[in-house]
Amino acid sequence: MPPKTGPTLFLGLELATDQLRSSIVDENLELVGVEAVDFDSELPEYQTQGGIFTTPGEAYTTPIEMWVKAFDLLMEKLSKNHDLTKIKAIGGAAQQALVWWKSHPNSPLQNLDPRLPIHVQVTSQFLSIPNSAVAQDTSAHTHALALEAALGGPDHMAARVGTCAHASLIAAQLLRVREAWPDIWSRTGRVQVASSFLASLLCGGYVSMGEAEACATGLWSHVSATGAASGTPSHWDEGVLEIVGGNREEGRRIYNWLGDVDISGGRRRLGTVSRYLIDRYGFDPDTIVTPFTSDYLSTYLSLCPSPSDAVLSFGPMDVLMTPAPHFLPTRLFHIFPHPAQDSSEKRRYVAMLTSRNADVPRALVRDMYTKSWSAFDRLVAIVPPGGSIGLDDKLFSFWLLQSDSHPLGHVKGIFRFETGVKVNEFRDLRANPRCLLESQILSFRARWSRMIATGVLGPNAGRSRNASTTPSPISNQAKRPSSTAHNMGLPFDPYDYNPLPSRVLATGAAANFPSIANLVGDIFNAPALVPTTQIDAAQIVPHRNAPPPGFPARATLGGAYVARWVWGKEKGTSAGTGRGGFEEEVRRLLAKRWATAGGAPLRTNINAPGITSKTASAAGSGTSTPYGGRSGLGANVLVEVDEEEVEELDSIRQTNYGLGIGNAFGDGLSGASRLRTITGSTMDSVLSGSTLGDTPSTAFTTPDLGSMTSPNPAGTGDTSTATPPQSTTTLTPVTAMLTSDAELQMGLAKVADPDVDAFMSYAAIVPEYCRLEGMLVKGLV
């Protein structure tokens, strides 16, 4: 074994839907390594698409054996390219899924032979269900509703287990297996969430899940600090277990399957790496394994949001998360214990709003109304807010292809409204992309305001907007009087920006689109910031949620940061580490790195094809050309339009579909000059260049556009001067605007500023949006 010299390193893993990913950071959280295994391309024998199987009945599954083989491949890559003796701690995250083990006296992960890979020794014969349901699976939704009814309705269920029925509830998956496959049920001996399964592969035996993961099952009763002081700790709810199991005895079996839960807050180690990993790959025997959590929460941890921030993660399921000081469960949102906090800290939580109708509707609208993502982005840019120039004839659409979160859990279908009346299709088809995006973001806007009213975010509804380094441009405006009369029947004032987040930290492929970033900023009246790792990755492939080779995934960084934090806590304050909570420690380490590096941005990639520098482009430097400041909605700009794109947009306008489509927007696309008039609030998006010719989209993964040329055609092996990959379609993604040093040192860059007039325009249509949503909930349309 080589001598233990050199920098101390920390490894973060993520078991995602389509890949098993890893990132390595040093003591100052600087990126030093990235490796990944792509399920579809590197494990083609499993014949997955985007890492999953789709089957009738809204079932989406993935083979567990593929995960194990991917783990072997990833360990081989890590051991080949990195000195694993330097890794002192490992953290990680995983997608939502269950692993069903057969009854066995000992864990199959114990006493593995280091001469053989794990997938040869731990095969599907040890699993009672070889293909596990993933988060996209909705086949157990009826069972979730039945469980909710048995617990007295959504409010009673939320008060009892912290969540109400939703399509991928783990308790519902357990209930479905018991009712549909009693033979599988009878031979099961252990059930693990995917994050605990991944940690178990490292530790060589079953490990317990964290409390944040337990709260997502619908079986866990979390007790706040007040309740815990009275002697009642958080626990598995035996009454709910009995309902799911069918009787008390089976409920006790489920209790034993799930095992104990780590309620320490994520501060302590799960264990150390197994003897198998030490002997086969050369890990240090003292390497610790820290608590793993869900991929969304790990992404949240990597961004270290302030109390007034919101984290908006776009993907197969869009998720909006924000810090919460109180545990106040309701049907309006999910709430989880913060996954990285010391037991001595005051309890902190993460409030979460979700939408299952995310990437799939966006990809479907793209295929139905445009030929490319670049045309999709431009079409959103040229259409006025609300789909119409007029003030009283705004267009609305609801794309509810899957059962979604409250209040739309029982509503499915595609619904469009013009002048408040349901229509089969808009008179101008070009309104569809923008109206879809507006509906998705307005839904979060409205649900955020309803969440604020519960008090879960604390008594200070203003959320300390001035605490942000990027103040709101209308922060000095006089506040409107707030009352139901002024609010047109809403329980909140849509014009009041104070309860809204001061910043939106966005991740996921959709955040790479200038039009979407601008929409987020305008609707929330807050600057939109994106991690610099994602901004640089978007310059190569802007259309996929998976990062390109050489770029880290945010969830892997979150796992590595937790590993560094727990290791620092165990090392002790005498060495100058481990001080304060997780966020405080991460900010301290990044500030130290910033000072030591002389203000150099965080490294964003490791030998990524097409990137000549590993460090992020400085905001506003010209290397990463920023979009300029935006003027008001009334400012008109004339922009040359590519001939090919004009033909596509013209074809959209001229296509009749039997509906008599007109040229409602008057955007000047016809005529010899090929000029169009756009508004200042959408100018940034339109300035992006484009050509056409994508491949069709696929479910749950934003499609890759065109084939990529070899990053090193000469075959020299030197990637530092590699030719940037080319694609048949060019979408100019977001780039960094002028950003404060405080944000840059955290690895964030601003990509969109809010537009005052646009915010007011959207505030004006929030009441109508909520009215139409209420009609759908009540089944009136």
Image: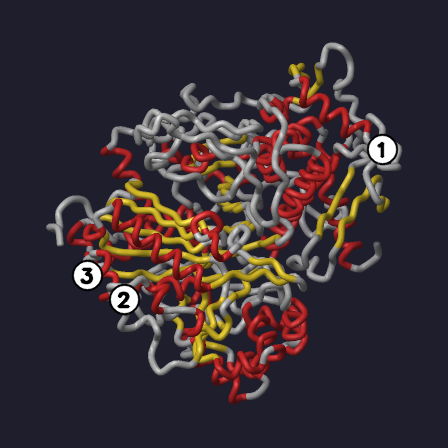
Q: Considering only vertical position in the picture, is 315 above or below 292?
A: above
Split into 4 quadrants, where in the image is the N terminus? bottom left
- Is there any visible trace of residue 262 in the rendered image? no
Res. 425 mark = none
Q: Residue at x 51, y 46 (%)?
A: 310
Looking at the image, tell me whether mark 1 or mark 3 is earlier in sequence order.
3
Res. 286 mark = 3
- SS at circle 3: loop
Q: Quick check: 420 left or right of 463?
A: right
Task: Give residue 777's position: percent from left, percent from top.
Answer: 76, 58
Query: What is the CA distance from the residue labelled 1 to the residue labelled 3?
Result: 68 Å
Specify the amino acid type for callout 3. Asp
Task: Give residue 616's position: percent from left, percent from top.
Answer: 37, 30
Q: Residue at x 75, y 51 (%)?
A: 773
Q: Residue at x 59, y 21 (%)?
A: 687
Query: What is the CA distance from the residue labelled 2 to the residue labelled 1?
Result: 64 Å
Residue under label 2: 271
Nearest the eye: 17 or 350: 17
Q: Residue at x 30, y 56 (%)?
A: 90
Disc 1 packing (10 Å; few <14; some 14–19; many ≥20): some
Looking at the image, tell me whether mark 2 or mark 1 is earlier in sequence order.
2
Q: Quick check: 58 left or right of 556?
A: right
Task: Give residue 167's position: percent from left, percent from top.
Answer: 62, 63
Specify the amino acid type for callout 1. Asn
Please tell me whether mark 2 or mark 1 is closer to you in this view.
1
Q: Are marks 2 and 1 in contact (CB under 8 Å)?
A: no
- SS at circle 2: strand
Residue under label 1: 656
Q: Considering only vertical position in the picture, is 504 above or below 40?
A: above
Q: Are marks 1 and 3 in contact (CB under 8 Å)?
A: no
Query: What is the CA distance from the residue labelled 3 to the residue labelled 2?
Result: 10 Å
Looking at the image, tell me whether mark 3 or mark 2 is earlier in sequence order.
2
